[in-house]
Image: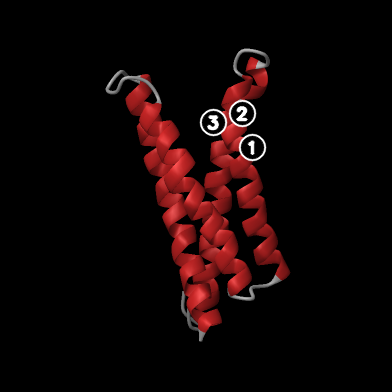
Amino acid sequence: MIQAGARRLHTWLAWLFVAAVLVQVFLAGLAIFGATDGFGLHVDFGYTVIGLITLGVLLTAVAGSLSRREIGLSLLLLVLYVVQTALPAARASAPVIAALHPVNALVLFALGLIIARRGSDARSPEGSA
């Protein structure tokens, strides 16, 4: 029962992660186009909401006794999230490295979609399209 609930929550959190990345892009756009005073909202949302969701994706994969592959993908999501939070710090010393921040965001978005779809596909009844 707990495993089934964790599996459902895992899929739900993965979809929430995908939505949160879209919100994060919007918050960056607000900062870029001057609708906010800097990137504070973008940074705070990334460190809190997205960080907690990412950790939740991994924890529910483990609690749900998902396959090694699913746990591995969830761990990769967390590792890429940690990299994402570190990239902007390289702005002054290695701007080319810091410029990977939006590229890594795309990878995180794609990986979130993969995890969410795999979870949804695993839960859908066989034969449904």
Residue highlighted by disc 2: 87
Disc 1 residue crowd, few under 14, some 14–19, many 20+, Cα 10 Å: some
Mark 3 is on which residue type?
A: Pro
Q: Amino acid at mark 1?
A: Val
SS state under label 1? helix
84 shown above or below 119: above
Coloration mode? secondary structure
Q: Quadrant of residue 83?
A: top right
- What percent of the width, then of the height, locates residue 16? 42, 56
Residue 103 lies, in percent from the top left, at 58, 33
- Depth check, mark 1 against mark 3: the one in front is 1
> Total of numbered circles in the picture?
3
Q: Which mark is residue 83?
A: 1
- The amino acid at mark 2 is Leu
Q: Secondary structure at mark 3?
A: helix
Q: Which residue is mark 3?
A: 102
Q: Secondary structure at mark 2?
A: helix
Q: Do labels 2 and 1 touch, CB within 8 Å? A: yes
